[in-house]
């Protein structure tokens, strides 16, 4: 009941505030128009304040390495594009940005496509009679990365299609990644709506602002799952939906101290789960995706036994988000933030100890030696205890308000791991199912902890850099723990050269992994792109 009550109140507040704020204009103190927006697919930065009628880009990118899959820092937070050992890809994009932010009605649209060669990786598949063979799998020759139309009326915003989404709490360029929806996987196709940036709440005289959104999506990765699954044990779930919502409050951003608090929630629902045992299809569970399912997902209502889940509809997870920012001086800020991950009511009640992401960020003047620094600690070792406990397992117990223990972050008993095409939708800091070359569709090492650090800046007015490093140790999962532990140290250096801020940009990245989690890998990536406006 706890998760249902909390999320029902959460959605009620968001809906009520949408109705109140619909008449408001975008606040003049919004920081959206002066900050920098990161193009996560090319590690490039474009000023959001520039709003031409048309933006276009054409680029060529290639990477190579010594392992079947790309090193961690080349593959992660790149939209699921650079995952293979070798690739030579062409990118083409065109967009009509939202122009006059202060007009009541505004619209935009965009399209981005990729294509080219990518090497294959071998995944085990059961062929019958206990025999397995390695089948080579590679990404598609061409695909659409983004295709969307968007618009706003006063303070209300909506986007239909497939578009990148920035995190409401972490720096998309320097952070290890948002725990609920990072830039690690290809964006889903769907419809989302909410506020256009933070909006002043009536009667607070600008001292309190609100931001929030919700949406429904499809990943359309069934073929990827079917091609990579081992068809021997456990299950594969296809044809499912994805739901997301968020709600955040922020104090006046013109003050020296800015406090932000809020929550995010995501859910997989609907679909068909095929369970295999020793290479034979054992049984199938069908989860409905009708109007009732959409509504029960929205309020985290009971799914019923026919939906494959007698507690709530679908697989829910989310975070509590908190940030405190202090303005040291003009263009210099220091920010502390945290995301508390939850998978059920015990996590919502913060009964999972120190689990979550804890970060410190420094931002400074543009175009100087150090423009940004991020240091993060990520801990997923508590998971509300090592043993799963639920009231239904203990008839007559007086404790009936929640389930706890063995939260098994990003895993679920009837849905694949929280991923799209093998890449984590949430934090890439947890090793994604893409790396399971035995065709297992879930996370193997979500009991883990580690550190991530990144720094960016300019070596010259035409030459920017980004340096990243991380260390993590993992102990398997709460239900399938390892006898010992595995670890990894990863590092990457990226350089971007843009002569005199012209249309050409050249970038290069070198990366390496060391340890038993990913193996001892190295890799490099180069790219050249031409962009313009009209």
Image (tube, rainbow, N blue to C red):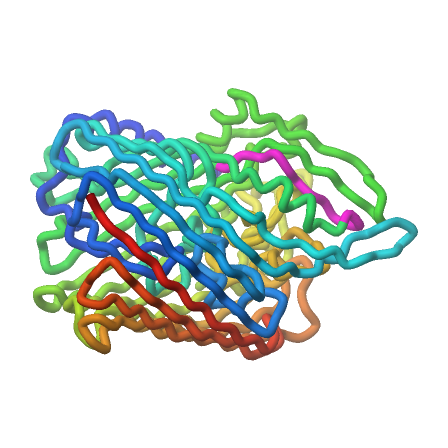
Q: Nearer the viewer, residue 258 or 502?
A: 502
For the point 58% across and 42% down, which residue is it? 221
Q: Position of residue 151 (x, y in %)?
A: 26, 31
Q: Position of residue 322 (x, y in %)?
A: 30, 54
Q: Position of residue 351 (x, y in %)?
A: 47, 55
Give the quarter of the image for residue 338.
bottom left
Is 153 placed left or right of 123 in the picture? left
Q: Position of residue 63 (x, y in %)?
A: 49, 66
Q: Is residue 211 above or below residue 496?
A: above
Outermost residue, top side? 291
Read off the magenta span: 231-242
Is 23 placed left or right of 527 in the picture? left
Q: Is residue 202 above or below residue 139?
A: above
Q: Nearer the viewer, residue 144 or 244?
A: 144
Q: Nearer the viewer, residue 400 or 316?
A: 316
For the point 58% across and 52% down, which residue is it? 139
For the point 46% across and 49% down, which residue is it? 114
């Amino acid at each position: 009941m706890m998760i249902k009550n909390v999320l029902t109140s959460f959605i009620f507040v968001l809906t009520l505030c949408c109705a109140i704020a619909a008449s408001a204009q975008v606040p003049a103190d919004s920081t959206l128009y002066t900050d920098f927006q990161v193009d996560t697919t090319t590690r490039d930065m474009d000023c959001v304040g520039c709003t031409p009628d048309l933006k276009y880009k054409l680029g060529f990118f290639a990477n190579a390495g010594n392992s079947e899959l790309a090193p961690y820092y080349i593959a992660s937070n790149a939209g699921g594009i650079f995952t293979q050992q070798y690739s030579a890809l062409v990118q083409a994009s065109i967009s009509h940005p939202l122009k006059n932010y202060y007009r009541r009605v505004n619209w935009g649209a965009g399209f981005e496509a990729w294509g080219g060669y990518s090497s294959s990786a071998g995944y085990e598949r059961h062929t019958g009679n206990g025999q397995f063979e390695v089948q080579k799998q590679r990404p598609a020759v061409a695909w659409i990365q983004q295709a969307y139309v968007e618009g706003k009326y006063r303070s209300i915003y909506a986007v239909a299609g497939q578009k990148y989404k920035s995190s409401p709490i972490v720096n998309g360029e320097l952070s290890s990644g948002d725990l609920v929806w990072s830039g690690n996987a290809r964006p889903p196709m769907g419809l989302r709506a909410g506020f256009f940036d933070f909006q002043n709440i009536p009667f607070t005289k600008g001292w309190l602002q609100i931001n929030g959104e919700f949406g429904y999506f499809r990943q359309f990765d069934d073929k990827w799952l079917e091609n990579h699954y081992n068809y021997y044990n456990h299950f594969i779930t296809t044809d499912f939906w994805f739901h997301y919502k968020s709600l955040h409050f922020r104090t006046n951003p013109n003050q020296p101290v800015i406090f932000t608090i809020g929550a995010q929630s995501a859910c997989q629902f609907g679909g068909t789960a095929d369970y295999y045992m020793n290479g034979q299809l054992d049984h199938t569970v069908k989860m409905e995706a009708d109007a009732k399912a959409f509504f029960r997902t929205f309020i985290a209502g009971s799914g019923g036994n026919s939906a494959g889940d007698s507690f709530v509809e679908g697989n829910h997870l989310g975070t509590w988000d908190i940030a405190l920012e202090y303005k040291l001086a003009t263009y210099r800020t220091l920010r502390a933030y945290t995301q508390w991950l939850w998978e059920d009511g015990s996590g919502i009640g913060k009964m999972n100890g120190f689990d979550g992401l804890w970060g410190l960020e420094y931002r400074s003047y543009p175009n100087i030696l150090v423009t940004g620094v991020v240091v993060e600690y990520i801990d997923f070792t508590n998971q509300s205890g090592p043993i799963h406990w639920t009231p239904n397992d203990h008839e007559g117990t007086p404790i009936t308000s929640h389930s706890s223990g063995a939260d098994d972050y990003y895993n679920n008993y009837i849905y694949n791991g929280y991923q799209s095409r093998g890449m984590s939708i949430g934090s890439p800091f947890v090793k994604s199912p893409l790396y399971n070359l035995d065709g297992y569709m879930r996370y193997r090492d979500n009991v883990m902890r580690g550190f991530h650090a990144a720094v960016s800046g300019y070596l010259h007015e035409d030459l920017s850099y980004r340096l990243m490093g991380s260390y993590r140790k993992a102990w398997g999962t709460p239900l399938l723990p390892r006898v010992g532990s595995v670890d990894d140290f990863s590092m990457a250096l990226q350089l971007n050269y843009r002569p005199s801020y012209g249309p050409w940009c050249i970038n290069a990245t070198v990366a390496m992994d060391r340890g038993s989690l990913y193996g001892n890998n190295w890799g490099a990536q180069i790219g050249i792109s031409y962009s313009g406006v009209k």
